[in-house]
């Protein structure tokens, strides 16, 4: 692996008898050949505490997997938590298909220059009569997004990676080499959305 290479950080969480995957694209800014291994450990230490603060105790972190996208020749790096790692909230969990959506944006134009993450496992206490998320949910997601951008945004603290939208092109004509667009900001509101089954990259 070398400077400029692309990878996907995949967070796997066991959530009400199923495994949910959230993937975020990143680009290498490190001279270290083992940067994906270092990144997985750094992500666990810097991002996951606030991610788990959004979830109930019924959600369990399985692993953080960093997958090589470009050049796409290296095996996955899997970081397993040193101990069983649950969400923080002790209350009942919202239905499994209820998600809080974070939209990641770049300065590019078009759908292939932005991305989304669907986070499930939030407390039912954070719902607003089943039609949206309340202020507690918004505050928790706002903190999580701030931490991710502070660490991996355009001027992030990390010496390993920067957050990217990785575009593989339209489904009918995929790009031979995926293209990356640096994430500049994020958008999220209090609407509740469905975590329906989605295609894996």
Image (spheres, rainbow, N blue to C red):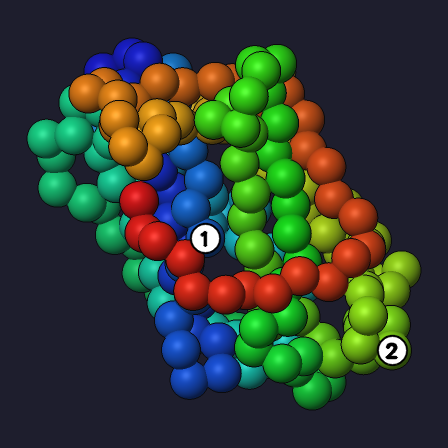
Callout 1: SS: strand
The percent position of residue 64, horizontal first and vertical second, equals 36, 53
Q: What numbered label is drawn on residue 129?
A: 2
Residue drawn at (81%, 64%) of the image: 133
Q: Quadrant of the C terminus?
A: top left
First in sequence, mark 2 or 1: give its number. 1
Side (left or right) of 38 relative to 184:
left
Q: Quadrant of the N terminus?
A: top left
The percent position of residue 109, horizontal first and vertical second, equals 58, 15
Side (left or right) of 190 relative to 88:
right
Side (left or right) of 58 relative to 79:
right
Whole-Å distance between the Cαs marked 2 and 1? 26 Å
Q: What numbered label is drawn on residue 22?
A: 1
Label 1 crowding class (10 Å Cα cut-off): few <14, some 14-19, many 20+?
A: some
Residue 135 in sight in this render: yes
Label 2 crowding class (10 Å Cα cut-off): few <14, some 14-19, many 20+?
A: few
Residue 144 position (above or below residue 16): above
83 vs 135, nearest the viewer: 135
Callout 2: SS: loop
The percent position of residue 165, horizontal first and vertical second, equals 47, 27
Indicate which label's residue lies in the foreground, 2 or 1. 2
Q: Quadrant of residue 74?
A: top left
Residue drawn at (72%, 52%) of the image: 141
Q: Quadrant of residue 92?
A: bottom right
189 vs 29, nearest the viewer: 189
Residue 28 in sight in this render: no
């Amino acid at each position: 692996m070398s400077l400029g290479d692309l990878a996907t950080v995949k967070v796997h969480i066991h959530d009400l008898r199923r495994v949910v995957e959230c993937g975020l694209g990143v680009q290498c800014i490190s001279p270290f050949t083992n940067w994906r291994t270092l990144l997985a450990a750094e992500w666990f230490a810097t991002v996951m505490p606030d991610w788990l603060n959004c979830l109930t105790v019924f959600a369990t972190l399985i692993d953080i997997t960093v997958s090589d996208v470009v050049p796409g020749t290296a095996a996955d790096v899997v970081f397993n938590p040193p101990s069983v790692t649950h969400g923080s909230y002790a209350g009942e969990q919202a239905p499994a298909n209820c998600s809080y959506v974070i939209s990641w944006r770049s300065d590019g134009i078009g759908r292939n220059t932005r991305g989304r993450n669907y986070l499930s496992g939030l407390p039912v206490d954070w719902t607003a009569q089943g039609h949206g998320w309340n202020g507690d949910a918004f505050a928790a997601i706002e903190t999580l997004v701030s931490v991710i951008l502070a660490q991996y945004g355009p001027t992030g603290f990390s010496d390993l990676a920067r957050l990217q939208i990785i575009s593989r092109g339209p489904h009918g004509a995929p790009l031979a080499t995926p293209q990356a667009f640096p994430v500049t900001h994020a958008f999220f509101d209090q609407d509740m959305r469905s975590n329906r089954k989605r295609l894996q990259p």
